Image (tube, grey):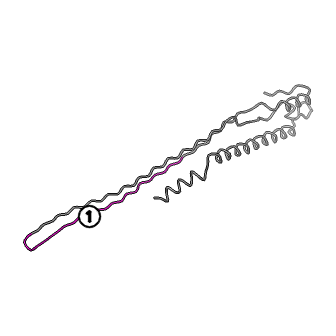
Amino acid sequence: MANAIEKITNTLTNSPLSTMIENMGLSIATAQAALDGNSIEMLQNLASSKVDIGGNEISLLNLGFIPSFYAFTEATFDAKMDFSLAESTSFNADVELSVETQVFAATVNVGFARKFDQSASASSSIAARMVSLPPPENLVTLLKNLSGGTTTTT
C-alpha cells in the first residue's frame, strides 16, 4: 500500500508542471519549424516546376501558385490526477460457554480482517490550434516584382 502511494507521489513530483509546459512549448516550436520548412520546400518546388504555355516555359510560382503557410495560434495542456486510499481493520469474536458438572466446554470463533483499497487515475490532454496564414509580405512583393506585378495570393 505504501508502495502505491509512493509511486503516485513520485510521479507527481518528478513531472513538475513547468517541465511539462516547457516540453509542450519545445514540441510546438519543433512542429512550427517543420511546417515552415515544408512551406519553403513547396516554394522551391513551385519555382522549379515549369509548364509550357504558348511556347513559353513558365514556373508555377510565376503563374501565381504560392505555398500555404501555417502557424500554431494556441495550445492548451490539461493534466488531472486523482487518487484515493482506504484502509480498514475489523476484529470480531463469538464465544459460547457451557458449564455442566465436571465438564467444561468452550467454543470460540475469532475473525480478523484487514482490508486495503486503493485507486489511482490520471488523464492528460494536449490540444493545439493551427491556422493558415497569408504568405510573407516580402515574398509576395518579390514575386510581384519578378513577374511584372501579376502574382496573386489567393
Is 154 or 137 nearer to us in this picture? 137
Majority SS type along the magenta span: strand
Q: Residue at 71% of width from left, 45% of height from top?
A: 26
Is 126 or 99 nearer to us in this picture? 99
Side (left or right) of 141 relative to 99: right
Q: Residue at 69% of width from left, 34% of height from top?
A: 73
Residue 133: horizontal and vertical position, in percent? 75, 32
Q: Residue at 37% of width from left, 57% of height from top?
A: 115
Residue 57: horizontal and vertical position, in percent? 91, 35
Task: Please give the range of residues in magenta.
Answer: 100-122
Residue 56: horizontal and vertical position, in percent? 92, 32
Residue placed furthest toward the bottom: 102
Q: Residues within 10 Å of mark 1 (few under 14, many from 20)?
A: few
Q: In which image quadrant can residue 48 be found? A: top right
Residue placed furthest toward the left: 101
Name the amino acid, label 1: Val
Q: Quadrant of the N terminus?
A: bottom left
What residue sits right under mark 1 in the picture? 110
Q: Secondary structure at mark 1?
A: strand
Residue placed furthest toward the top: 149
Residue 4: horizontal and vertical position, in percent? 49, 57
Q: In which image quadrant can residue 113 be found? A: bottom left
Side (left or right) of 109 relative to 130: left
Q: Is 55 within the magenta?
A: no
Is 99 or 146 nearer to us in this picture? 99
Q: Is 105 within the magenta?
A: yes
